Image (tube, grey):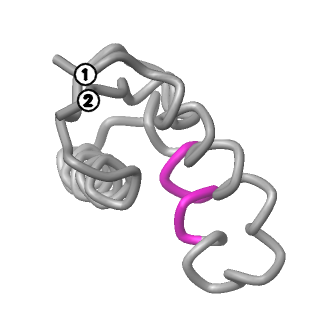
Amino acid sequence: MKIMTCRQLGGPCDLEHPGETADDVIKANDRHLKEAEKAGDAVHQPAREAMKGRWRHPKKSMGWYRDVKKAFADLPQV
């Protein structure tokens, strides 16, 4: 298992998301951003909008996705 933070995934905070794969932590951060949006957290709103854009336009977002996968691969196991 490896851990990435909201900040490492483009968000504003250091909440940790553990996962076995990069996709696991990406999905966990997406849930986190959705919850922050529902709670009215304006600080997370830009990251939430960016994440929504990536889901809507996955081909355009491949650079971000490759970067996250590489960063995840470079992390140590915990």
Camera-nearest residue between 38 and 26: 26
Q: Is residue 66 left or right of residue 47?
A: right
Q: Residue at 62% x, 40% y: name it.
A: 70
Image vertical order of residue 67 relative to residue 37, above or below:
above
Q: Is residue 30 magenta?
A: no
Q: Quadrant of residue 14?
A: top left
Tag 1: residue type?
Gln
Q: Which residues are magenta?
A: 47-52
- In which quadrant of the rendered view does residue 16 lie? top left
The kind of secondary structure element at disc 2 is strand
Q: Which residue is mark 2?
A: 2
Q: Residues within 10 Å of mark 2 (few under 14, many from 20)?
A: some
Q: CA distance from mark 2 to mark 1?
A: 5 Å
At label 1, counting other C-alpha atoms closer than 10 Å, the crowd grade (few under 14, some 14-19, many 20 or more) is: few
Q: Which numbered disc covers residue 77? A: 1
Check the image and report above or below for 74 versus 60: above
- Residue contact between numbered discs 2 and 1, judged by CB atoms under 8 Å: yes
Quarter in which the N terminus is drawn? top left
- Number of numbered labels in the structure image: 2
Residue 58 x/y as whole percent = 68, 81
- The x and y percentages for residue 3 are 27, 26
Query: Which one is closest to the eye, mark 2 or mark 1?
Result: 1
Quarter of the C terminus within the rendering? top left
The image's mark for residue 45 is none
Residue drawn 19% across the image and 52% down it: 35
Disc 1 element: loop
Q: Position of residue 27 (x, y in %)?
A: 30, 60
Labels 2 and 1: the sequence-earlier one? 2
Residue located 24% across and 46% down the image: 32
Residue type at mark 2 is Lys
